[in-house]
Amino acid sequence: MTLAALDLAFRAASVALLLVLAAALLQDFRKVLAARLGAAFALGSAAHAVSYSMDVTSRVPLWHAPLIALSTGTMVVFWLFTRALFDDEFRLHWWHGCVWALVTAFSFAGCVWIAPGGHVRFSVTVVNLIVLGFIALAIAQTIASWPADLVERRRSARVFIVCATALYGGLNAVLQIAVAGHHVGAVAETINAGVLACTVAAIVYAMMRVDGTDLFTAAVEPASPDVSSQPPPVDAADQKLIDALMRLMADERIYRQENITIGVLAGRLKIPEYRLRRLINQRLGYRNFNVFLNNHRIEEAKAALADPTQAEVPVITIAIDAGFQSLGPFNRAFKAVTGVTPTEYRRLKVDAAWIVRH
């Protein structure tokens, strides 16, 4: 088999696997934001598999330019995918689309105007620095959010998916910057296509090994514990730990502490982190440690907002007393649980109390 045929076979395998992955995500989890972004990332990666070349010494074929632009914009989608995958409360905003459009447009301009105008190294360097920047953002998101993930089976899968993609994308970006303007030859191109095929196969395998409901949250997951299915019976040891945990929450209100972590909580209970993580997830029904803490904070805030004696206490004071660091996160978390803002909740309680009195 010639190098050209082998290169084509690797690229075709990558594209086929990515299209199957995108179709599976959209079929089973099309209402889940993380799955939709994952499908978009898979499709963009397919465009990368078709069009990518380290050899940028010659003019890019015009039909390649849109594919290369989509491939570059895919790194923005990758960052958003990690945001949604690791943060169950993440939502897309209009400016996310603007960032993707700007990156894609600059990449297209680089292919069509900047590089052909004699600025190959500049175009390649800037585009790949953008790619490296979004890879760094994705890794930072993974590191920041990973400790709060309570679902054990998706923790390892998530990290593998992000690390494998970041490693391949990062090495490609560095190599393309290094060889910009130089001919690299068919052997290097074929090796790159083979590495891409292996990376895609490994990611698809990792995702297939994990139950989709573990990897992705439900389409409309409540912020409170999931009670749609009955948990297994709680044994005496677990029940004792749950009781101790609830005492820390109800009596000591440990959720008020600044920067409280699952490690600190496990230390108070004198158990390993993995056991506390499993307890909160499998026995109490939470998928995210921050949601677990916020629910207790919100319950305290609800009681304070409904208390007539605290009618003049500012909402920000109630939020900070309950353990929130600022008003914005409190408002978002409160509305996610109750369906109304804290101010609306207080007004509804005041109106209800007035009706009862009259």
Image (cartoon, helix red, strand yellow):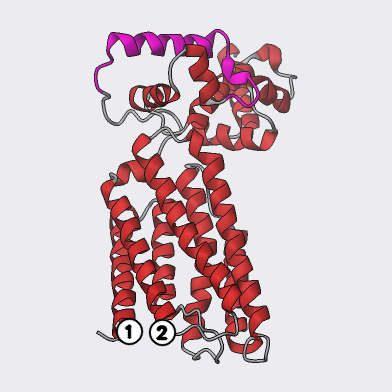
Amino acid carrying mark 1 in the image = Leu
Determine whether label 1 and label 2 are within 8 Å by CB. yes
Residue 266 pos. (x, y %): 48, 19
Front residue of 295/313: it is 295
Front residue of 335/132: it is 132
Judge whether residue 249 is colored magenta: yes
Residue 190 pos. (x, y %): 38, 78
Which type of secondary structure does the marked residue at label 2 adopt? Answer: helix
According to the picture, the residue beneath numbered tag 1 turns out to be 3
226 displayed left or right of 87: left
Front residue of 248/193: it is 193
Q: Residue at x 28, y 86 (%)?
A: 2
Q: Residue at x 35, y 56 (%)?
A: 203
Amino acid carrying mark 2 in the image = Ala
Q: Main SS of the magenta segment?
A: helix
According to the picture, the residue beneath numbered tag 2 turns out to be 186
Judge whether residue 277 is colored magenta: no
Q: How many marks?
A: 2
User: Would residue 218 be visible to someone looking at this image?
Assistant: no
Front residue of 145/168: it is 168
Q: Quadrant of the N terminus?
A: bottom left
Q: Quadrant of the C terminus?
A: top right
Q: Badge 2 local density, few (<14 within 10 Å), some, or many (20+)?
A: some
Magenta residues, start to end:
232-260
Residue 201 pos. (x, y %): 31, 61
Query: Dividing the picture into quarters, in which one does residue 133 lie?
Result: bottom right
Q: Badge 1 local density, few (<14 within 10 Å), some, or many (20+)?
A: few
Query: Dividing the picture into quarters, in which one does residue 253 lie?
Result: top right
Which type of secondary structure does the marked residue at label 1 adopt? Answer: helix
User: Would residue 88 be visible to someone looking at this image?
Assistant: yes
